[in-house]
Amino acid sequence: MGLLNWFESDASTKKRQTLPKRRLGIESLENRELLSVSLAEIPQPDYSSALVADQDYGSMAPAASVQTEAEITTITKLAAPKSVSKGTSVTPSTVTVNWLAPASTLGITHYELKIVDSATKNAVSATAVKVNVGDTLTWTFEGLQAKSRYEVQITSMGAPATTDSVKATLKISASTPAIALATVKAVKPGLTSTNVTITDKDKYIPFVDGKTVKTYEVQYAVKSTSPVWTTGAVIASGTTVSNATKGTIDTSISGLLPGTNYIFRVLTSYVDGVLKETILTSQGKNGSFKTVALPVPTIAKVAFTLVGGDIGVSVSGKQTKPELYTTAGTVKYSLYVSTSSTVNKATGRLDGAQRLTLSGEEIIGGAATFSMKSVSLTDIGGILDTASSSSMKLLNSTSITFQIVAEYFENDVLVQTVCSRASKFTLPKWYKPV
């Protein structure tokens, strides 16, 4: 496209009524071949008209003409933008670029922006961005991958600009940083739960107006060589955080086992919801914790009684930290007896142990001491044999072993079982075989 400007003399201006239109033509300077002709209405004394290639208006003979000539320089290549730079607003998912217009913007109508993967050269977006001349010459690309390298292409565009010969492109490399490390710390673990504090010192503003701009997912697993991860808590983007100015988020995870070593980690993502990077904290102070173990009951005293032909037993027990049960869940105690004193290492249970029928209901924990009574040992097969109501004999041994089993429940669901040490007792002389 070429733009032709001219001025008319006062004499020609006075003849406007006889010259209402102007005939404009373009000729090649090499062979004087007429390229195009157009008619233009001239409403003002200062005239200009655009000449468009390939428009054929045919031959026209003006009633009167005054001819003048001027050279027009056609544009073969638009000037490229200059001083392209990566802006300061760069995050793990965005890149901002700035540029300046070239010294000559002749023929430029807008700039076309593309961002491609530096390695594959594949466009990140199928649609190019259009920034018009006169607009602020800056643009932010969003939805990028953290810790990735890109190439931004900015091209000067004109109209009709149908061939590459009228384009000029400048390129710049840009990288997104990795997501900043968020750390997680367990605070006062309990029997089956723990409070958790997430600390995020990300300089890319993880909190705005007291709300998160990231999503945080806390996962935990029993410490092992092949951990199986479970999601314990999710803090969604947009959640209000009371201590956002300190860069910390308080939450909790539950459903844990007492007395168990755990590892845990935080997965973070930005507002677009796509998980960007998995961040596993160190396996030291901030990356592992152990829940409180269930208190183990102990047998304090065992007393035997002889009532008719029945042998009764009374067992008193002690419990350390009984407050754990009163504030967390419920513990139920059962009494077991066996002629063997061998304990299974895997389960902690007495071999061949049988549960005694207690007088009254099962003992429910929450106290430092408790008492368990059984009116008769004679219903325990293999321990005592009563030939008659007045005679009885002890089979196989002159001693028996007791064990208290504590079952811990939360919301009526059995969580874990712990056993006291096996306590061996010798029957009194009057229990000897007769």
Image (cartoon, helix red, strand yellow):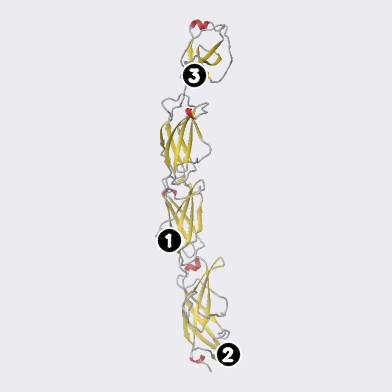
The label number, if any, that marks residue 3 in the structure image: 3
The label number, if any, that marks residue 198 in the structure image: none
Q: Are marks 1 and 3 in contact (CB under 8 Å)?
A: no
Instruction: Locate residue 23 relative to residue 71 in the image: left or right.
Output: right
- In the rendered image, residue 12, in percent from the top left (x then y), is placed at 51, 6
Mark in front: 2 vs 1: 1
Judged from the image, the secondary structure of the residue bearing numbered disc 2 is: strand
Q: Which residue is mark 1?
A: 288
Q: Given the current orientation, which residue lies at the most extreme bottom position?
A: 434
| Residue 310 visible (yes or no) | no
Of mark 3 and mark 2, the one earlier in the sequence is 3
Position above or below: 170 against 148: above
Label 1 amino acid? Ser
In three-dimensional space, the C-alpha distance between marks 1 and 3, rounded to whole angstroms, equals 74 Å
User: Could you classify mark 1 by the number of other residues whose Cα lies within 10 Å: few (under 14), some (14-19), or many (20 or more)?
Assistant: many
Pick the residue in front: 196 or 90.
Answer: 90
